[in-house]
Image (cartoon, grey):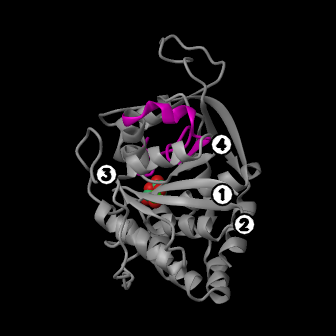
Amino acid sequence: KTKIIIDTDPGVDDALAIAFAVLHPNLELLGLTTVFGNVSVEQSTVNAGYLLDLLKAKHVPVAKGEGVPSVQKPHSFPDFVHGKNGFGDIAVNYPADFKPVDMSAADFIIKTIHEHPNEVVLVPIGPLTNIALALQKDPTIAHKVKEVVIMGGAAHEKGNVSPGAEANIWNDPHAAQVVFEAPWKVVMVGLDVTWKTIMPDEPMARIAEKSPVVGGFLKEICKFYANFYRTVGGFDGFSLHDPATVMYVTNPELFETEQGQIEVVQSGAGAGKTFFAPKGEVYAEDYWSKRDNAFVCLGVNKSGVLALLEDVLS
Ligand code: BDR
Ligand code: CA
């Protein structure tokens, strides 16, 4: 089994990603670490607790992380995408006995990576604040992690919060730069592939029929999210940003990657944009061609992703 930690801001598509990770037979979820992003960190933490309860995985620890970006002022929460509660404003009964562990997300990440050297895949599907903080507290984790598979960014595609930026990177561009610069292998699952992984209604309905409790809940929360994608984005369904990212861990053959360097625009109108320089390309500015530790997903097998999600969630 592949050991993973998911750093998350649930969030509708985060909920799908967490369900996929818990239900997948080849993944061992070592913990969820929470961060602000789609909702406040308080809300994302209780949402993580709710999901683990729903998925009968209460043994999985939750470590609460950062509530604001590392440097810049916070943006407002996108309640028009994920609802005020992060679950499409579906009322939920939060488990009374849920408690996050007595350790910050960054400390939990550091401790867990040291407990399982070269085995842990870190999967951040929210802003990268906790990950950058963990690196700053203990840079040696960069040499002990197996790989870091990030939902965020856009190499060639347009952004989703500004013409250039994807939401997770835009929420903390300074942290993102720290994470892309560290000497570890980073896989970027960004809008280049997640704009292409659009889930229509039919598979969600089948999942809910086969798995009324978990699938039924996921189908309900997806309605709000799908409505946003349909009305604002003009898509025939909703984007599987976060679940596609976890799927890279189990099924990398569903994706095509290109190796190179990512640099994140830190502020101004382009804040959060991820510029990509493929390996071997030579530029005039001397900060380019210094690293090639990022593997950027540029192609995806959409029907393979949809089938895998339906299979695991059913
Ligand atoms: C990312 O931002 C959030 O809205 C989603 O949960 C996903 O992680 C997509 O840009
Ligand atoms: Ca997310």
Q: CA distance from mark 1 to mark 2?
A: 8 Å
Viewer-nearest residue: 314 or 258: 314
Q: Which residue is mark 2?
A: 308
The residue located at (67%, 67%) in the rendering is 24
Q: Which residue is mark 4?
A: 298
Q: Is residue 1 left or right of residue 150?
A: right
Q: Label 3 neighbourhood size at 10 Å, few (<14), some (14-19), many (20+)?
A: many
Q: Earlier in the sequence, mark 3 or mark 4?
A: 3
Viewer-nearest residue: 95 or 36: 95
Q: Label 4 neighbourhood size at 10 Å, few (<14), some (14-19), many (20+)?
A: many
What percent of the width, then of the height, locates residue 168?
Answer: 42, 49
Quarter of image, res 148 = top right
Quadrant, the N terminus = bottom right
Q: Which segment is the magenta one? A: 137-166
Tell me the element at label 4: strand
Image disc number at residue 66: 3
Q: Amino acid at mark 4?
A: Leu
- Kindly report which numbered mark, 3 or 4, lies closer to the viewer in this rendering: 3
Tell me the element at label 3: loop
Do labels 1 and 2 touch, CB within 8 Å? yes
Q: Which residue is mark 1?
A: 247
Q: CA distance from mark 3 to mark 2?
A: 32 Å
What percent of the width, then of the height, locates residue 146?
Answer: 62, 41
Q: Look at the numbered disc 3 and say if its residue's Cβ is closer than 8 Å to ligand 2.
A: no
